[in-house]
Amino acid sequence: MTEKPRRINVIKADFTSPFYKFHITNIRRKVFVEEQGVAREEEFDQFEDESQHFLVMFGYSKAGTARWRTTGDGIKLERFAVLPKHRNSGVGSALVKAVLFDVMDKGKKIYLHAQLRAIPLYERNGFVKEGNMFSECNIDHFKMVYKPS
């Protein structure tokens, strides 16, 4: 018997809601703090409340999260995290597309800091590398700017 494909649903999440806050912080803790060794105090910062957060459902599972915020340089997309069992299933791409859709009409430069292994995902979604590689939380990154073709 073949398994039914699971539906990916990206939800614009209110971080003040205990439900959303719990699931978003849980995913980020598992991916960034436990898996990648980022210090908890660096992962969870003073920008949580001013950022627009997203939660991805893959079927009935909470699968990923991201956020965006306005900075002096434009709109920064950040904290993209997909749980290991949901990677390479379309969750990351759906998340990037949903966040981009949310910020497209703001008329500002859209950028992010991409970990090396995530660069192909962002390139497939219209981002290009800008500048030199740098380290953030002891992880190599490139700044990427959204430049749709």
Image: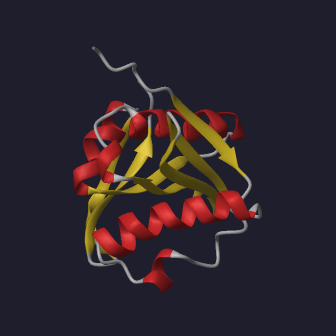
Q: In this orientation, does residue 72 appear?
A: no
Whether residue 121 sits left or right of residue 66 in the image: it is left
- Pick the front one: 136 or 42: 42
Please tell me which residue is depicted at 26% across the width and 71% down the height of the picture: 139
The spot of residue 33 in percent (x, y) is 38, 75
The image quadrant where one finds the C terminus is top left
The spot of residue 25 in percent (x, y) is 55, 67
The image quadrant where one finds the N terminus is top left
- Pick the front one: 121 or 29: 29
Please tell me which residue is depicted at 29% across the width and 69% down the height of the picture: 35
Please tell me which residue is depicted at 35% across the width and 43% down the height of the picture: 86
- Pick the front one: 92 or 70: 92
Whether residue 5 sits left or right of residue 56 in the image: it is left
Q: In this orientation, does residue 61 appear?
A: yes
Relative to 143, residue 97 above or below: above
Q: Quadrant of residue 18?
A: bottom right
In the current view of this chain or complex, which residue is farthest to the top?
1
The spot of residue 148 in percent (x, y) is 45, 29
The spot of residue 108 in percent (x, y) is 63, 45
What colour scheme governs how the chains and residues are painted in the rendered image of this protein?
Answer: secondary structure
